[in-house]
Image: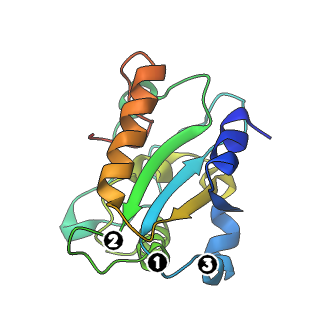
Amino acid sequence: MSNERKILQAQGFEGFISMGELMNGARMQIPAQMGVYVVLRENQSAPQFLTEGTGGFFKGKNPNVSIAELKENWIDGTSIIYIGKAGGDGSSATLNKRLEQYLRFGKGANVGHWGGRYIWQLADSKDLVVCWKTLTTGSPREVEHQMIAEFKANHAGNRPFANLKD
């Protein structure tokens, strides 16, 4: 178990289910509430990048980037590779619906989940682990922003691998 997993568990994150399991029916365990989620790669070996990932072509745009760009964005020494949000600020999205979109995008569907698309160019994307934290009050956007800022503070100003913006 990674140190980041222990910290996330202590902060109230739940789930810790692989992408593969979520794609094969375990998605129903994800709450239909607003919140934040984190994608972890707990395998500490060097990542293997795919030239053509499994992500969908949303609005006809190719989600794939060069292997050089993937390597440039990779952050060694952490298992946290993406931080996302669902709901709040006038959005009716829930963790369940947002992660459903993300998983469908990862299966090649033309779905509007452009953020985090680098995940789908990892050879072991189905082994990645997803956890979430529901929020009954507050803004998921603010929590996500705070989590990314904290990550950057601990990783020389770098965002998690698949977070393309703050």
Q: Name the residue under label 2.
A: 87
- Is 43 positioned to the left or the right of 156 in the image? right
Amino acid type shown at disc 3: Arg
Viewer-nearest residue: 126 or 48: 126
Viewer-nearest residue: 29 or 105: 29
Mark 2–mark 1 CB contact (< 8 Å) = yes
Figure disc tally? 3
Q: Looking at the image, is mark 2 or mark 3 nearer the viewer? A: 2
Q: Name the quadrant containing residue 42.
A: top right
Q: Name the residue under label 3.
A: 27
Q: Name the quadrant containing residue 78.
A: top right
Amino acid type shown at disc 2: Gly
Q: Position of residue 81 (x, y in %)?
A: 51, 41
Q: Is residue 64 visible?
A: no
Q: Where is residue 38 in the image (x, y as percent from the top left)?
A: 53, 52
Q: Where is residue 118 in the image (x, y as percent from the top left)?
A: 42, 46
The residue lying at 47 percent from left, 70 percent from top is 99
Residue 88 vertical placement versus 32 (above, below):
above
Mark 2–mark 3 CB contact (< 8 Å) = no
* Mark closer to the chain start, 2 or 3: 3
Residue 20 vertical placement versus 145 (above, below):
below
